[in-house]
Amino acid sequence: MSAGTRFRRRLARLVLRAVRWRTVGEVPRRGILVGAPHTSNWDWVLTLLLAWDSGVRIRLLVKHSLFRGPLGPLLRATGAVELDRANPGATIRELLAEAETDESFLLGIAAEGTRGRGEYWKSGFHRISRQTGIPITLAFLDAPSRTVGWGPTFPATEDVRADMDRVRAFYADKRGFKPELATPPRLREEG
């Protein structure tokens, strides 16, 4: 483990202890991470602390408009990847090419797509997992219990509804900072 990784781990543990949050679960070596519920900008901070505490780097997809100004260099330095929502294909292809040669590839996606309540989740995490064979990992935060962590990891199947039933069961008791803004786990592709 590098000196930088050790420093980030110590810093994350100190900050998490100071704000009385804890991390749980086992970090996967490879995964398409679904981060939910996504209802606040604090979700990013906790995701970063979870990654640092676990000693991993998450390539977190973040909308391109947030990279303007002084926030851009900070986001890039912490592993965020600029995503143009109007044309996400090129970014995704580049990341997946990287995944082919990287033994510990973790791609983080906020499947809700926004911090506001919507009708459906974005299905990119499921499509990417099916196309690449990289399993889905359900990452989470739960504000009432002050817990952030790694949930189950499983391969995506052709049965989208069954996969989403598994997702719904896991997130059923997880609450974000603003629960009223959470989008229920549902994909248009479920029919």
Image (cartoon, grey):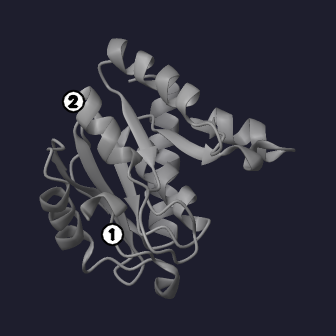
Give the camera-side residue of 179 and 166: 166
Q: Which residue is mark 1?
A: 185
Q: Earlier in the sequence, mark 1 or mark 2?
A: 2
Taking depth in this image into account, of 46 and 38 the one nearest to the observer is 38
* Residue 154 point in image, percent of width and height: 15, 46
Assign the N terminus to one quadrant of the image: top left
Q: Is residue 69 left or right of residue 123?
A: right
Q: Position of residue 139 (x, y in %)?
A: 33, 56
Q: Amino acid at mark 1?
A: Pro
- Cα separation, mark 1 vs mark 2, equals 22 Å
**Mark 1 vs 2: CB contact within 8 A:** no
Q: Which residue is mark 2?
A: 133
Going 24% across and 78% down the picture, which residue do you hit?
172
Disc 2 residue type (three-letter): Gly
Q: Identify the mark at residue 69; answer none if there is no mark.
A: none
Q: Position of residue 69 (x, y in %)?
A: 87, 44
The residue carrying pointer 1 sits among few (fewer than 14), some (14 to 19) or many (20 or more) residues within 10 Å by Cα, namely many
The residue furthest right is 69
